[in-house]
Amino acid sequence: MPRPLIAGNWKMNGLKGAVAEFGRMMEGYDRKMRARVDLLICPPATLLATLPVVALGSRIAIGAQDCHAKASGAHTGDISAEMIADTGATFVIVGHSERRADHGETDAVVRAKAEAARRAGLIAIVCVGETEAERRAGVALDVVRAQLAGSIPDGATGADLVVAYEPVWAIGTGLIPTMADIAEMHATMRAELLARFGAEGAGIRLLYGGSVKPDNAGEILAVLDVDGALVGGASLQAEAFLDIARTYS
Ligand code: PEP
């Protein structure tokens, strides 16, 4: 079984003062928790140069929320995977549904970004998930299968890839799928990874994301093939984030 990961996505939240909240996370990530679960915070790009330095010695990993597919060049406003690695960060989220929707990112774009992450030595967290209409139409499994096939680079392993299943309708809404639906989706994703990558597919962590809170983390994280969570809103407060991680201790 892969080692669990609780990842926080701060999205476009967090000024310099948020470093203090991160400090409280570091204090709370005690030996007992460290033995059982990995923690990751993905702050906005403006804090990317700061948090990896603050985090030194804490064993909380730092990641970015997006990267450009190219290593450098005339791409105003973008940052490359190499620049992210240069800060000391070790992960990057790619293909979050907000980027797919707001920036028109296709599976091919997401795949190119995941390849860039590997080139730079980062672990890519590739996000997939169906919309509410797709869930209602009964095509959620097909949609996610297609996103996995199109977004994940060849030759992926647990050392360079994490997959996050995030139903679009569950993000920031307080709604979550039934545990049976999460189990069905995660079993489907695991089967796809095993079929494509053989035994390596067993080591790729599968996170669930979408309205994970301290009061529902227990049941969600107990579902088979859920190897952790990608947490948005509840990752902005140290206590809520740590409470979710404490599910494993
Ligand atoms: C997310 O945006 O990745 C997310 C899961 O958000 P929230 O936890 O706020 O639903």
Image (tube, rainbow, N blue to C red):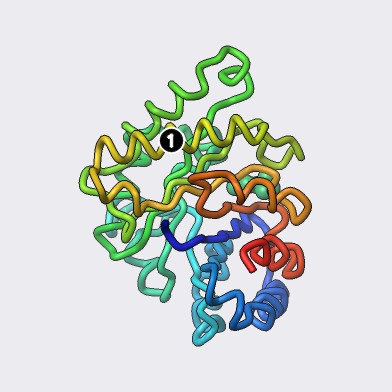
- The C terminus: image quadrant: bottom right
- Horizontal relation, residue 19 to residue 64: left or right: right
The residue shown at (57%, 65%) is 41
- Horizontal and vertical percent for residue 59? 51, 79
The residue shown at (41%, 76%) is 88
Q: Is residue 120 above or below residue 76?
A: below
- Horizontal relation, residue 81 to residue 224: left or right: left
**89 or 174: which is nearer to us?**
174
Is the residue marked 1 within 8 Å of ligand 1, measured from its CB?
A: no
- The N terminus: image quadrant: bottom left
- Amino acid type indicated by mark 1: Glu
From the image, tell me which residue sits under label 1: 105
Extreme top residue here? 137
**248 or 64: which is nearer to us?**
248
The residue shown at (64%, 46%) is 220
Q: In this view, does 60 lie above or below 3?
A: below
- Horizontal and vertical percent for residue 157? 28, 53
Give the mark count.
Answer: 1
**Mark 1 burial class by Cα count in 10 Å: few <14, some 14-19, many 20+:** some
**64 or 76: which is nearer to us?**
64
The residue shown at (37%, 35%) is 148
